[in-house]
């Protein structure tokens, strides 16, 4: 029986207990009672939409760097981030969707960008003050709870709240020279645990499949090549399926005194296994490494609750977070043999991202 039907049945059963012990029919009553219709259960039990602006002073984009005057390379790219997120709960699970626009500074140039008066393209490592690149990144994750599907509580025990089937996808595009066009798909299980103070901890082991685009691999870009051997006719990369583990958590700091209960902590981490050569289906060029994309901790302040009271909780929040992304896009940050993560054995500092950043979020 569906969740909606169970609620309606329970309501009807409770109404039946109001009948007198003599089981009198409506005809026996001195007047007729007009039954009120049972309110239908909404399809979405929770809907939460938010917009966010954040500033990331030390972001990176692999292959985007500039030479320092005293030697070495500057791989930091400051980014403004504009995001929209949606979360909902329905009878059988949850849906989460986010799309963000990243606007880079001059260290990550949009294409075309002239490296010199005679050049026609900028590949990597050149910066002449061109406009920064713009990237769009979208992500969706949906869960289908086993407790809800099977109408049971068998998948809840102790702190384990539920086990769900999870599916999702990512999509990305950027107007840099490499013109990435990432698409990936995930599927697996999610284990949801309860934390104190209305908190949760979710961990999801997943299968991960990615396809992308890399203009650097296109045949004829630098020299004649053999498609499928040392270049790709269209620059489209196709990686092997690998493993992934995604983790996220949230908890109000409810142990604080009542006059200070405006704070919460949250975080996430994604671990993505090696997916073959970084130029797959080409091989023997640059093996990929395990990628760690994480925001270990975010401290959130409920500004609207602090200013206008509990009625307006979560309407406006401000936050500060730490972001750590090692082997970005699977590229080996320790490699010294390519011109992306290193040049002549010297790191470009562009394949690992470490930054503190902050933002403001508005719920509507």
Image: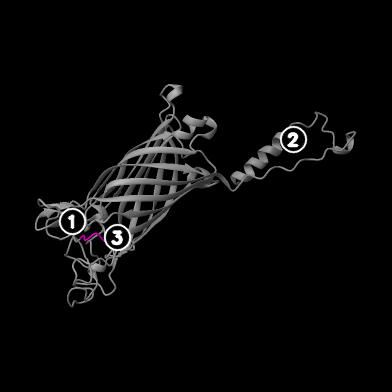
Which structural element holds mark 1?
strand
The mark that comes first in sequence, 2 or 3, is: 2
The answer to whether residue 143 is visible is: no
Question: In the picture, residue 67 is in which quadrant?
Answer: bottom left
In this picture, which residue range is highlighted in magenta?
Answer: 127-132
Q: Few, some or many C-alpha atoms within 10 Å of disc 3 (few <14, some 14-19, many ≥20)?
A: some
Q: Few, some or many C-alpha atoms within 10 Å of disc 2 (few <14, some 14-19, many ≥20)?
A: few
Give residue 66's mark.
Answer: 1
Q: Is residue 73 above or below residue 163?
A: below
Q: Who's the residue at 62% across and 45% down the image?
A: 4
Question: In the picture, residue 259 is in which quadrant?
Answer: top left
Give residue 16's mark.
Answer: 2
Where residue 174 appears, x then y in whole percent?
33, 61
- Closer to the camera, 144 or 51? 51
Where residue 11 appears, x then y in whole percent?
68, 38
The mark that comes first in sequence, 1 or 2, is: 2
- Residue ID for mark 3: 131
Where residue 156 appears, x then y in whole percent?
46, 37
């Amino acid at each position: 029986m569906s969740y909606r039907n169970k609620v309606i049945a329970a309501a009807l059963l409770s109404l039946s207990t109001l009948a007198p012990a003599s089981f009198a029919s409506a005809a026996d009553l001195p007047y007729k009672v007009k039954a009120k219709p049972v309110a239908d259960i909404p399809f979405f039990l929770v809907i939460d939409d938010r917009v966010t602006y954040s500033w990331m002073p030390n972001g990176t984009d692999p292959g985007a760097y500039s030479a320092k005057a005293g030697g070495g390379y500057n791989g930091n790219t400051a980014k403004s981030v504009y995001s929209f997120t949606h979360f909902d709960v329905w009878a059988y699970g949850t849906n989460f969707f986010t799309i963000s626009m990243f606007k880079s500074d001059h260290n990550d140039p949009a294409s075309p960008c002239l490296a010199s008066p005679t050049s026609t393209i900028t590949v990597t490592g050149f910066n002449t003050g061109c406009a920064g690149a713009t990237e769009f990144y979208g992500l969706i994750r949906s869960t289908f709870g086993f407790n809800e599907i099977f109408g049971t509580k068998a998948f809840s025990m102790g702190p384990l709240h539920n086990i769900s089937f999870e599916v999702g996808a990512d999509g990305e595009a950027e107007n840099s020279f490499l013109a990435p066009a990432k698409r990936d798909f995930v599927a697996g299980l999610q284990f949801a645990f309860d934390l104190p103070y209305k908190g949760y901890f979710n961990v999801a082991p997943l299968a991960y499949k990615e396809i992308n685009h890399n203009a650097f691999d296109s045949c004829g870009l630098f020299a004649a090549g053999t498609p499928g051997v040392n270049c790709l006719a269209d620059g489209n990369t196709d990686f092997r399926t690998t493993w992934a583990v995604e983790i996220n958590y949230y908890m109000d700091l409810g142990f604080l005194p009542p006059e200070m209960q405006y704070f919460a902590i949250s975080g996430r981490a994604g671990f993505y296994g090696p997916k073959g050569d970084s130029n797959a289906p080409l091989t023997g060029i640059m093996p990929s490494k395990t990628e760690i994309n994480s925001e270990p901790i975010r401290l959130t302040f409920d500004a609207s609750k602090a200013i206008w009271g509990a009625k307006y909780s979560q309407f406006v929040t401000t936050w500060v977070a730490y972001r750590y992304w090692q082997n970005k896009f699977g590229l080996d940050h320790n490699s010294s043999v390519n011109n992306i993560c290193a040049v002549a054995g010297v790191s470009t500092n562009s394949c690992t991202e470490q930054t503190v950043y902050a933002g403001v979020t508005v719920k509507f």
